[in-house]
């Protein structure tokens, strides 16, 4: 009986999950390793942070996804090291051997080495962080209504650092929350004092999109009352004040960092295998210097004729790399393998109700039509029918009522359950 090839996939994000689905029920033994037990639909984290949808609506348990699989297993564990010379993956609890290894660990928030920022500002790269933002924002107003005085200016400023898609979407959502929701929840508070401040190192928001999208998104932010600070750099944050390179200071107890990402690199590889904290790979996603180790998605750095400085770290690249690698692995002869090249289908972002920008290869449009297009596309990308219906219902409820019932403060239980 022929022994099935054993493939380990580290990470169950867009790339890892797509690769596992491509290899599902094929003549391979596949094991997916991840530190959490579910796949997360990251583009909608900002809606969790603003209380518009429940985390469960955009989270999908791996064991449910692979419930009917005949060849794919999942293990909940945190990978500590890879030993390529022994074909081993070392985790906190166990060791795993492999014939082929695929690294799909994605990215984490880049604080550029600033420990104060990392410890005091909020990131938004996983479900727990999105919930933490929601908790902290809501706790701020509960605190203010008890104090019945404006004792701390920082309580009234929500600062978002970074004007990419995540930054502008958060700014738009919080602005609508300020206008439509918070005054009804806290009728005796004056929310004119609440400022939503978006800090950008570039002159315009959404710098990677077209000039038309940049101009329109800045217009939308101003219409929503967002304070857009362009050409500014945050150098530090002490938990109470945001310090700018220009010397300006913003008092704030609510700072969300959306200003960059860096790869989740695993120990075990020499420095020459890395570029910009990403694994250097060839056109087949093979890590340089290794025949049976691959990297896909945000964690890999691949130069191609169209992208000589690496691909953008977006979901579409990750998904398409994983599809291509999966198809290659299933081919009997490596001579039949196909090189990867990314065909950019466009980009889009939403900045509040009826406000969105869409850049397609041959078409650019903004406004309410772009907003409906954004909603439809994201709804279709959500995995299960049940979750599609739940998200659609929440969106429709919010659309007609300008409200949601999901503003729950869910603080972690700090009780130590360690057995003595």
Image (cartoon, rainbow, N blue to C red):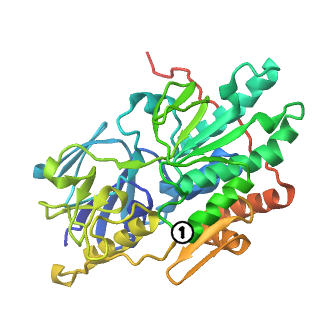
Instruction: Decide which of 78, 239 is in the foreground and name it.
Output: 239
Q: Position of residue 66 (x, y in %)?
A: 46, 62
Q: Give neighbour class at mark 1: few <14, some 14-19, many 20+ (Cα, 10 Å).
A: few
**Left or right side of 390 for 289:** left
Instruction: Decide which of 24, 236 is in the foreground and name it.
Output: 236
Residue at the (52%, 48%) spot, across then down = 200
Q: Position of residue 138 (x, y in %)?
A: 71, 34
**Left or right side of 237 for 323:** left
The answer to whether residue 41 is visible is no
Residue at the (72%, 64%) spot, across then down = 392
Residue at the (29%, 69%) spot, across then down = 28
Instruction: Decide which of 100, 30 is in the foreground and name it.
Output: 100
**Left or right side of 407 for 63:** left
Q: In the rendered image, which residue does mark 1 sit on?
A: 211
The answer to whether residue 133 is visible is yes
Which quarter shows the C terminus? Answer: top left
Which quarter shows the N terminus? Answer: bottom left
Callout 1: SS: helix
Classify residue 372 by image quadrant: bottom right
**Left or right side of 58 for 39:** left
Q: Where is residue 379 in the image (x, y as percent from the top left)?
A: 64, 67
Q: Residue furthest front?
A: 246
User: How many numbered badges does the structure rendering display?
Assistant: 1
Instruction: Decide which of 4, 358 is in the foreground and name it.
Output: 358
Q: Where is 329 relative to 232, above or below?
A: below
């Amino acid at each position: 009986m022929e022994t099935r090839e054993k493939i380990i996939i580290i990470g169950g994000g867009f790339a890892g999950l797509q690769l596992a689905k491509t290899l599902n029920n094929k003549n391979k033994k596949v094991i997916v390793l991840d530190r959490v037990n579910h796949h997360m639909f990251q583009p909608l984290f900002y809606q969790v942070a603003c209380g518009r949808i429940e985390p469960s609506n955009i989270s999908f348990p791996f064991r449910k996804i692979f419930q009917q699989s005949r060849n794919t297993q999942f293990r909940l564990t945190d990978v500590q090291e890879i030993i390529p010379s022994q074909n081993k993956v070392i985790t906190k609890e166990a060791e795993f051997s492999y014939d082929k290894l695929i690294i799909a660990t994605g990215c984490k928030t880049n604080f550029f080495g600033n420990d104060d920022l990392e410890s005091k500002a909020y990131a938004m790269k996983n479900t727990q962080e999105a919930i933490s933002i929601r908790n902290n924002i809501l706790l701020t107003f509960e605190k203010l209504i008890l104090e019945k005085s404006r004792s701390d200016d920082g309580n009234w400023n929500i600062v978002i650092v970074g004007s990419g898609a995540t930054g502008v979407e958060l700014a738009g959502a919080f602005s609508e929350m300020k206008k439509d929701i918070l005054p009804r929840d806290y009728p005796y508070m004056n929310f004119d004092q609440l400022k939503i401040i978006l800090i950008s190192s570039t002159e315009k928001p959404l710098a990677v999109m077209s000039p038309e999208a940049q101009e329109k998104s800045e217009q939308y932010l101003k219409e929503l009352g967002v304070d857009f600070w362009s050409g500014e750099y945050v150098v530090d944050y002490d938990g109470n004040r945001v310090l700018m390179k220009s010397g300006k200071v913003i008092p704030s107890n609510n700072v969300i960092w959306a200003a960059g990402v860096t790869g989740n690199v695993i120990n075990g590889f020499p420095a020459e295998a890395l570029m910009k904290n990403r694994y250097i790979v060839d056109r087949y996603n093979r890590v340089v210097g290794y025949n049976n180790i691959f990297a896909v998605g945000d964690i890999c750095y691949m130069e191609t004729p169209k992208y000589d400085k690496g691909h953008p770290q977006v979901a579409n690249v990750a998904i398409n790399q994983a599809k291509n690698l999966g198809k290659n692995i299933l081919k009997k002869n490596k001579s039949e393998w196909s090189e990867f090249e990314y065909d950019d289908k466009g980009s889009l972002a939403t900045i509040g109700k009826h406000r969105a920008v869409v850049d397609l290869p041959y078409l650019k449009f903004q406004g309410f039509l772009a907003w409906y297009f954004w909603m439809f596309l994201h709804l279709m990308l959500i995995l299960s029918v049940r979750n599609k219906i739940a998200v659609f219902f929440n969106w429709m409820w919010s659309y007609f009522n300008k409200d949601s019932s999901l503003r729950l403060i869910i603080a972690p239980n700090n009780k130590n359950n360690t057995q003595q």
